[in-house]
Image (cartoon, rainbow, N blue to C red):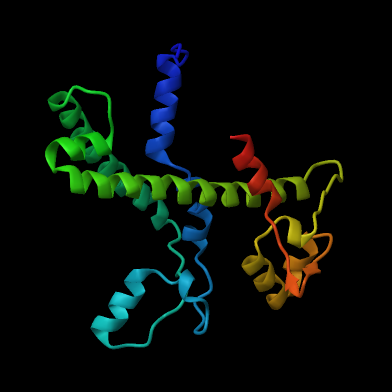
Amino acid sequence: MKRSLTAFDLTCLGIGAIIGAGIFALAGTAAAGESARVGESLIKTPVLNFIISWIQHTDLVFGRPAAGPAVALSFVVAAVACGFAALCYSELASMIPVSGSAYTYSYATLGEIIAWIIGWDLILEYAVGNMAVAVGWSGYFVQLLGNLPFGLHLKFPLWLVSDHTTAATIVAKGGAALSDYSSTALPVIMGHAIALNLPAFLIVAAV
């Protein structure tokens, strides 16, 4: 294979892998929080809430409380942690001067079993991260098209820009959120309601 990536390309790839997309897709949710009403889905509840509830023997608080401006402080703490991780990678790269990543360094320092576990962890991380980024991008893209200037407000059917669980939740809650879509009726095929996040699927296919 012919080498075609320049130092700039590799630097951009490295920075993208280090930063990730969570700060772009989840910063608003972290700042504003999510509903903390009892009865909300357990998926929206941080593990820390379960630990605190178990230690203090108190009722579990569902949802995520708003962090507000403290999100900026979280970015600073995360930047310091990333700096320490970068120093670790630098030391490992100098000690093990071969092309590789976490798998190679784990294999050389901790053995084959640990490297095997980390390798599969990396596969799951990139697979799940790919889907999470696509869903987050889809939400921003649909909102952008719905708020174009000069009166160009494009709206799509709910079932075409959302997964089934999210679509069912939006329909159940009702309210002003329903006006963001041209239709909120979910098509039914063989007795099952169908929903597909088409923008997320297309961006994954394009990449």
Q: Outermost residue, right direction?
A: 151
Horizontal and vertical percent position of residue 144: 71, 46
Above or below for 33 versus 96: below
Which of the 4 image quadrants contains residue 81? top left
| Residue pictured at 45% horizontal, 78% vertical | 62
User: In terms of depth relative to the viewer, which is nearer, 161 or 79?
Assistant: 161
| Residue pictured at 52% horizontal, 81% vertical | 37
- In the shown orientation, is residue 39 left or right of residue 169? left
Q: Quadrant of the C terminus?
A: top right
- In the shown orientation, is residue 195 left or right of residue 12? right
- In the shown orientation, is residue 187 left or right of residue 17? right
| Residue pictured at 82% horizontal, 49% vertical | 154
Which of the 4 image quadrants contains residue 206? top right
| Residue pictured at 47% horizontal, 59% vertical | 30
Horizontal and vertical percent position of residue 114: 20, 48
- In the shown orientation, is residue 42 left or right of residue 138? left
User: In terms of depth relative to the viewer, which is nearer, 196 or 57?
Assistant: 196
Q: Quadrant of the N terminus?
A: top left
Q: How many marks?
A: 0
Above or below for 128 versus 61: above
Horizontal and vertical percent position of residue 123: 39, 45
Above or below for 181 versus 91: below
Which of the 4 image quadrants contains residue 5? top left
Horizontal and vertical percent position of residue 189: 78, 68
